[in-house]
Image (spheres, rainbow, N blue to C red):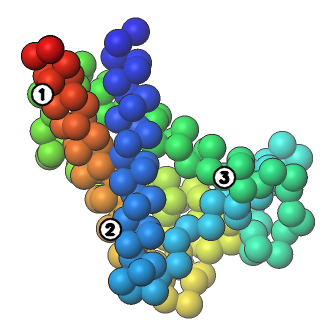
């Protein structure tokens, strides 16, 4: 049970790091963050059997699409944290290392490249966007940041637990 709570906290923490990075990118470089409402719209259309769109922005709006998108975003972050622990074992929770976390972060870019982007009309690995290589680079960077977030969240959790043990 303890491991499940740790996985939840690490997944939420890593996703939050990714979201903070998106805000920083917007402030420093003027790069718009992901519109999770459009992701929610895409997911919302799935219950009607529509998994691919020419352009998700021109698809009919779905009730609660922003909530759906943000919820999915955090649930996926938690699922990736669980995958990391499945691969590395529960011992990683207590002795986190950067390498596996970043490697998993990089590996997770497969999902947007081959599922999310094609489903939303951007093509495989953003091939139908105005600047595919730039979009790909941003996806990779975002997922590296997520991997770093997995590590940082685990380290913060380890620190908090060690401070708690001292009391």
In the picture, measured across the screen, residue 147 lies left or right of residue 126, that is left
For disc 2, the marked residue is 141
Identify the residue shown where x is 84% and y is 47%. 49
Asked if the residues shown at circle 1 and circle 2 are in contact, with their CB atoms under 8 angstroms apart, the answer is no
Q: Which mark is residue 71?
A: none
Res 3 seen here: yes
In the picture, measured across the screen, residue 89 lies left or right of residue 136, that is left
In the picture, measured across the screen, residue 134 lies left or right of residue 34, that is left
**Dividing the picture into quarters, in which one does residue 8 lie?**
top left
Q: Is residue 122 placed above or below 145 in the rendered structure?
A: below
Between the residue at mark 1 and the residue at mark 2, the CA separation in whole angstroms equals: 25 Å
Q: Which mark is residue 95?
A: 1
> Around disc 3, counting alpha carbons within 10 Å, would you say few (fewer than 14), some (14 to 19), or many (20 or more)?
many
Between the residue at mark 3 and the residue at mark 1, the CA separation in whole angstroms equals: 32 Å
Identify the residue shown where x is 72% and y is 56%. 66
Q: Nearer the viewer, mark 1 or mark 2?
A: 1
**Dividing the picture into quarters, in which one does residue 123 lie?**
bottom right
For disc 3, the marked residue is 69
In the depicted view, which residue is nearer to us: 110 or 31? 31
């Amino acid at each position: 049970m303890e491991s499940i709570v740790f996985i939840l906290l690490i997944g939420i923490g890593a996703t939050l790091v990714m979201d903070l990075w998106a805000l920083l990118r917007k402030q420093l470089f003027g790069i718009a963050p992901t519109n999770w409402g459009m992701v929610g719209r895409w997911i919302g259309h799935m219950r009607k059997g529509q998994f691919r769109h020419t352009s998700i922005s021109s698809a009919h709006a779905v009730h609660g699409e922003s909530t759906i998108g943000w919820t999915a975003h955090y649930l996926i972050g938690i699922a990736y944290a669980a995958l990391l622990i499945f691969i590395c074992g529960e011992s990683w929770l207590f002795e986190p290392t950067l390498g596996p976390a970043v490697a998993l972060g990089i590996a997770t870019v497969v999902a947007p490249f081959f599922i999310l982007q094609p489903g939303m009309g951007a093509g495989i690995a953003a091939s139908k966007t105005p600047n595919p290589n730039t979009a790909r680079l941003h996806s990779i960077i975002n997922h590296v940041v997520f991997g770093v977030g997995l590590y940082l969240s685990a380290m913060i959790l380890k620190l908090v637990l060690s401070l708690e043990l001292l009391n």
